[in-house]
Amino acid sequence: DTGVSQDPRHKITKRGQNVTFRCDPISEHNRLYWYRQTLGQGPEFLTYFQNEAQLEKSRLLSDRFSAERPKGSFSTLEIQRTEQGDSAMYLCASSLARGGAGNQPQHFGDGTRLSIL
Amino acid sequence: DQQVKQNSPSLSVQEGRISILNCDYTNSMFDYFLWYKKYPAEGPTFLISISSIKDKNEDGRFTVFLNKSAKHLSLHIVPSQPGDSAVYFCAARWGTYKYIFGTGTRLKVLA
């Protein structure tokens, strides 16, 4: 059983550059989430997909951020014109939503740590 | 406004004793609560959850208690083991997919 996979694990880039992260959820999971976590804080919700549809974006997600899940499987999170404040751990999680299945927890990947120089 | 609060940033417990981690919330619309454990350089790992219609859920050494009137959630670990040393996050859900996490409690189990 493969869990949620994120790539890369670490990304160091200069301010102003664009970065893209990838998340491969657990295969049968139809829900996918992106979170951001900074030191001493819990994960903060960024955005949510049900299959390929992006159903909600947090106001934390400025217009420099974009996320896609083109075929309802893997997802990408892109940050354009990175800023110092973008330095954080970016976590992806997935879960299964299915009628009659009851509450299903989110399962997280190990995250991508972004450092902006 | 922090809707889910973990007021103890750290906790130390002797091996074999009970660990009790606490979480308070403010939003009465939360309908599902979860606990996650996080080791350094790894993502959070799901531990145990509870629906708002229950007041207790048990899984092995882990028990979660929910007191809706007090808007309080707790995780009991009995007996505590050194491998339980990690950061523990509580999370609450409202709507069908919106999860709010606390800031975490670092548990250290002393051998």
Image: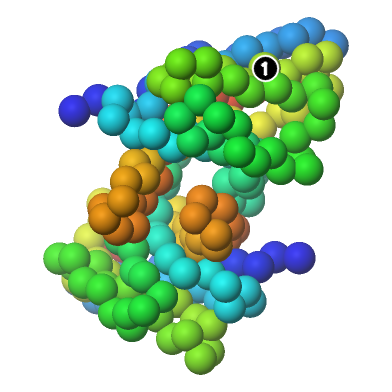
Position of residue A87 measured from the top left corner of the image (x, y, whole percent): 71, 28
Above or below A22: residue B110? below
Local crowd size for mark 1, using a 10 Å CA cut-off: few (<14), some (14–19), many (≥20):
some
Residue occupying the point 15% across, 65% down: B60
- The quadrant in which the N terminus of chain A is found is top left
Disc 1 designates what residue?
A78
Q: Where residue A115 sits: x, y (%)?
A: 68, 21
Is residue A107 visible in this depiction of the protein? no
Image position of A69 with respect to A62: above or below: above
Residue A35 image-quadrant placement: top right
- Give A25 or B39, whichever is nearer the viewer: A25
> Outermost residue toward the front?
A99
Q: Secondary structure at mark 1?
A: strand
Indicate the amino acid at tag 1: Glu
Looking at the picture, tell me which residue is in the foreground, B82 or A3: A3
* The quadrant where residue B25 appears: bottom right
Quadrant containing the C terminus of chain A in the rendered view: top right
